[in-house]
Image (spheres, rainbow, N blue to C red):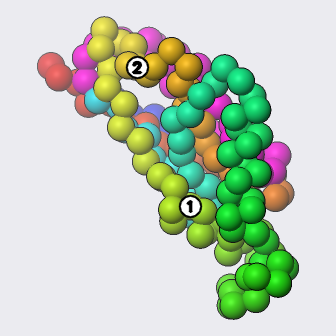
Amino acid sequence: MQTLFSLNTSGQGLYEFTRSVSSWLVEEGAADGLLTLFVRHTSCSLLIQENADPDVQVDLNAYFSRLVPPASDPSMRYLTHTLEGPDDMPAHIKAAVLPVSLSIPVAGGEMRLGTWQGIYLFEHRDRPHQRQVAAHFLSDR
């Protein structure tokens, strides 16, 4: 089973789409197997992260913004890929150090995520984008 999830972002931050993935697994009658998610872009990434306290997402975004500031920051003057704006090359760097794919076990049609875990697209660009995440479910049957 395969599908594409389309996610609209409105700038840097984490966008949860756990419910969409869960719903798709139920609609397709998934049983036991392995779910693979893959983001089809080079300036965002995927994370499994806490979904109970929104401050976690705020702090993660702030941390990575400090770790890799915009190209306009004096500490980033070594960057040469700057034609697409000061957020572009830093977005590529963040996507190079964070996962762009996830593997999630599924049992009885349900993802085996922990109590406070959710699936997030981590947008690294400032302006809105429509992002695609490819999903592939491989059944044990």
Residue drawn at point x = 61 percent, y = 68 percent: 92
Disc marking residue 111 = 2
Exactly how many numbered labels are in the figure?
2
**Element marked by disc 2:** strand
The residue beneath circle 1 is 95
Q: How crowded is mark 2: few (under 14 residues within 10 Å), some or many (20 or more)?
A: many
Residue 69, horizontal then vertical, whole percent: 76, 69
Residue visible at 69% across and 87% down in the picture: 79
**Left or right of 1, for residue 56:** right
Q: Name the residue: 71% across, 38% down.
A: 57
Looking at the image, residue 22 lies above or below residue 126: above
Q: Splitting the image into 4 quarters, where does residue 140 fall?
A: top left
The CA distance from mark 2 to mark 1 is 24 Å
**Residue 141: image location, x then y, percent:** 15, 19
Q: Give the range drawn in magenta.
A: 6-33
Residue 121: image location, x then y, percent? 61, 42
The furthest residue to the top: 108
Under circle 1, the secondary element is helix
Q: Which one is nearer the viewer's eye here, 34 or 51?
A: 51
Q: Which amino acid does label 1 sit on?
A: Ala
Q: What residue type is labelled 2?
A: Met
Per the image, is 18 magenta? yes
First-in-chain label (2 vs 1)? 1
* Residue at image location 51% in from the left, 35% down from the top: 48
Residue 1, quarter of the rendered image:
top left
